[in-house]
Amino acid sequence: MPMGPMDPIRNILVASFSSVVLLAAVFPSMHPPDQELLPNDASQVGKLSARKAQQPHAFRQYYGVEYEDYPVPDDYVVPGEWVFARFMYRAVRSWHGERMANWTIDYPRSDRHLSAAVRRLTRIDARSVEQPIAAEDEDDIYNWPWLYGVEVGHWELTDLQAAKLRDYVDRGGFFMCDDFHGTIEWQTFVASMKKVFPDRPIVELPDSDPIFHTVYDLHERYQVPGEQFVHTHLRYEKDGIEPRWRGIYDDHGRVVVAICHNMDLGDSWEHADNPEYPEQFSALGFRIGINYVVYAMTH
């Protein structure tokens, strides 16, 4: 049977993911920080700090909502010029009063699949494992030029987290957020994003923006659903029927925040090796992710 236009990419990625599994060992996981005890003094954000505070933190792995002691590849200590940095944030309270670790959704499987794709499909030297990033960890956040936030329709940033994220972006960092759906989650997202950027509007990204044309020309994009599509056959969740490609620009017309609303790119990376999840969604999900990474590293 002849291969379709997306099949070579699927074959490359599946081979890469298989190698990650084969060369893996158990790495001890930590419990996520208690969100009720997070420091919240934003007064020192952006001020001169000691050299020790500026050093990047070592790799660490946390228990996630979906995965616990996830095996790590043997080369996890080998550095790279790009690392999948995942933003750790405070979440809103659930109906029973607790704060879930929503920032760990899809983690770390999704992160490592995108890292493998960046290794295979670009010339960027990507590290095989991700880096969880906490605003509370002194100046660590400034060591990672690309930052990803998942399920941001459930975040409730502290003053420190909002101030640190703003300072991070103002210093040249790039923030991508994903996997939130519908009107209510959008309102929750905006409430915290307005703490970060009260002076910058959220706008629709035009098809002509360079972010859609760094590696792949993505004039024609479609809604990328989460793994729930396998069970429901619906591309949307809640009332998030129409996918939205939004962002925030800096004063030089550069996208500094890329907002993927009513879609779930994280699941498209996570389930790229899941035969029940449609290949077409992972194919586009990887193209979008790689475009955003390359844009962040070159603009």
Image: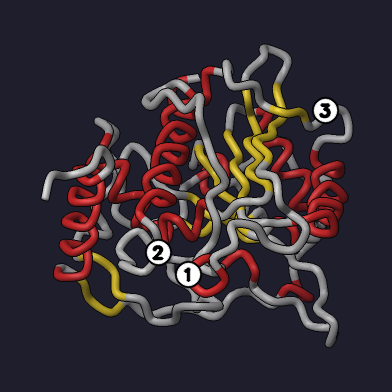
Image position, residue 103 (x, y; %)? 61, 64
Residue type, mark 3 in image: Arg
Percent coordinates x, y for residue 84 in the rendering: 43, 49
Which residue was labeled with disc 3? 200
Residue 131: x and y, percent? 45, 56
Give me the residue at 52% from left, 35% from top: 221
Q: Is residue 238 left or right of residue 217?
A: right
Q: Residues within 10 Å of mark 3 (few under 14, many from 20)?
A: few
The CA span between labels 3 and 2 is 37 Å
Q: Which residue is mark 1?
A: 230
Which residue occupies the foreground of this view, 284 or 159?
284
Q: Residue furthest front?
A: 1
Looking at the rendered image, the disc whose residue lies closer to the viewer, 3 or 2, is: 2
SS at badge 2? loop
Q: Are marks 1 and 2 in contact (CB under 8 Å)?
A: yes
For residue 214, above or below residue 163:
above
Task: Depth check: give the residue in front, 212 or 296.
Answer: 212
Q: Which of the two discs, 3 and 1, labels the residue nearer the N terminus?
A: 3
Given contact means CB atoms under 8 Å apart, are the residues at marks 3 and 2 in contact? no
First in sequence: mark 1 or mark 2?
Answer: 1
- Label 1 packing within 10 angstroms: few (<14), some (14-19), many (20+): few
The Cα atoms of the two marked residues, 1 and 2, are separated by: 6 Å
The residue to which callout 2 is attached is 277
| Residue that appears at 41% across and 29% down | 294
